[in-house]
Image (cartoon, helix red, strand yellow):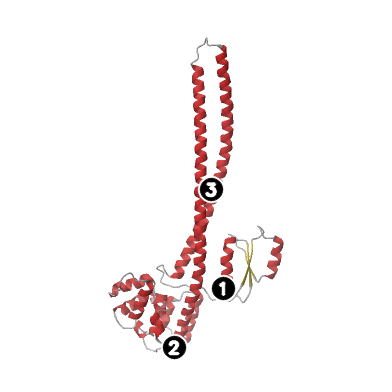
Amino acid sequence: MCEQCQKKKLPPGLVNKRRLKLWETNPNFHCAILGTCLSMDDLRKILRQSGVTLEGQYTDYELHATLVMQGEEKGRAAKNMQKMLDRKYSRWIQLLSRCKQNSELEEYWRSAMETGDIAGMFWAIMTHPVASADVVKRAYEDVHMLSHLQGASNRADLKRLKQLEQEHKTLQETLSKTRQTHHQQIARRDEVIRKQEQELLSAMSRSAQLPAGDDESEVSELRKQNQMLAKRLDWTESQLADRDVRVDEMREEIAGLKELLAEACMENDAMVEAMEGLLGEKDKGTSESPMQIDLSGKRILYVGGRSTLAPHLRSLVEAHNGRFEHHDGGLEDSRYGLQFSLAGADMVFCPID
């Protein structure tokens, strides 16, 4: 909640024959309405349209706080915010227009909390003509508590994202060193082949230039040289064959590293996308929040999977009042111990992909 929202008390809800305007709602709700229902891009657009100026390089918080104050009175900025909210969430406004009792509004709100799609329903209820003070207060309190839960989730995701970035950097450095070594070995092999070909051609040229009446000793010497060159050529070809085998092994290792790098990149992208969705930095305009789950101390057993995910899953289970155990399926942990883990678990997860 911003500072402007902390200075006022919550008055009773209003009952009208028409939907409330933004400036007619409790000013103490404006912080939650703007923070939940409008993205930072939406607020910047409203700021430009309304002719409101902020000095210097303003922060997102300063922009949010300024428009919260602008929404208290029927001005140009408040009207622009009203238009954008009504246009953005017209489907929810139309859906709730048929509701004549608070019990119907409460049912719609419970459904929105279960699915996590609360932004449109929140705006429609906060301005609904028959919404009682209790219904409005309940919706406001739920949104307030969801912001705390989302903050805790964001901190865990940021920690995991930092770990993934470090793993990504390490894999890139390993891949770069492997490629460099591979290129050096190929260059040395090509140089040996080139020298052997030059020596063989030189010997063949000298042999062809000898006259028919040369001494037998010189011919014998050349034959010995040819035999030595032939042996060296055989040895070189054997060495090249061994190096070809090692090069193939290096290529397989590089392919494996590329797969690991691709997996790390995909997981990194997924975490970034999840973070952006939670922080509301994209143009979604909605605020998704995890369901409130109480595992009541149940033991959750996770068998197999990637060991690097175990700490993240442990944090998730323990954050919902559960106990987490991990068994790698027999890679390092004893398979005999898996029987005891299964016997004491309330729920078992086994990833298959």
Q: How far from the left and from the top, in percent, is residue 10?
A: 42, 87
Is 224 positioned to the left or the right of 131 in the image? Answer: right
Q: Does residue 267 sit above or below 34 in this rendering?
A: above
Along the viewing direction, whichever of 106 and 313 lies nearer the viewer: 313
Q: Could you say where residue 275 lies in the image, as x and y percent from the top left?
A: 47, 67
Q: Tag 1, which secondary structure?
A: helix
Mark 1 and mark 2: Cα distance apart in space: 32 Å
Q: Is residue 56 above or below residue 10?
A: above
Residue 319, label in figure: 1
Give the vertical position of 351 relative to 61 (above or below).
Answer: above
Tell me the mark number nearer the camera, choosing from 1 and 2: 1
Residue 88: x %, y % from top left: 37, 74
Which amino acid does the dot numbered 2 rest on? Ala
Residue 148 seen from this side? yes
Mark closer to the chain start, 1 or 2 = 2
Mark 3 or mark 2, earlier in chain? 2
Q: Is residue 34 left or right of residue 319?
A: left
**Quarter holding the N terminus?**
bottom left
Q: Earlier in the sequence, mark 3 or mark 1?
A: 3
Q: Residue at x 50, y 19 (%)?
A: 206
Give the residue at x 52% y 50%: 174
Provide residue 180's location: percent of width, then percent of height. 49, 44
Residue that mark 2 sits on: 133
Residue furthest out toward the left: 51
Is label 1 in contact with label 2 (beta carbons under 8 Å)?
no
Badge 1 amino acid = Ala
Q: CA distance from mark 3 to mark 1?
A: 39 Å
Quadrant of image for the C terminus: bottom right
Residue at image mark 3 = 254
Q: Residue at x 52, y 32 (%)?
A: 192
Work out whether residue 286 or residue 54 is closer to the camera in this orientation and state it.
54
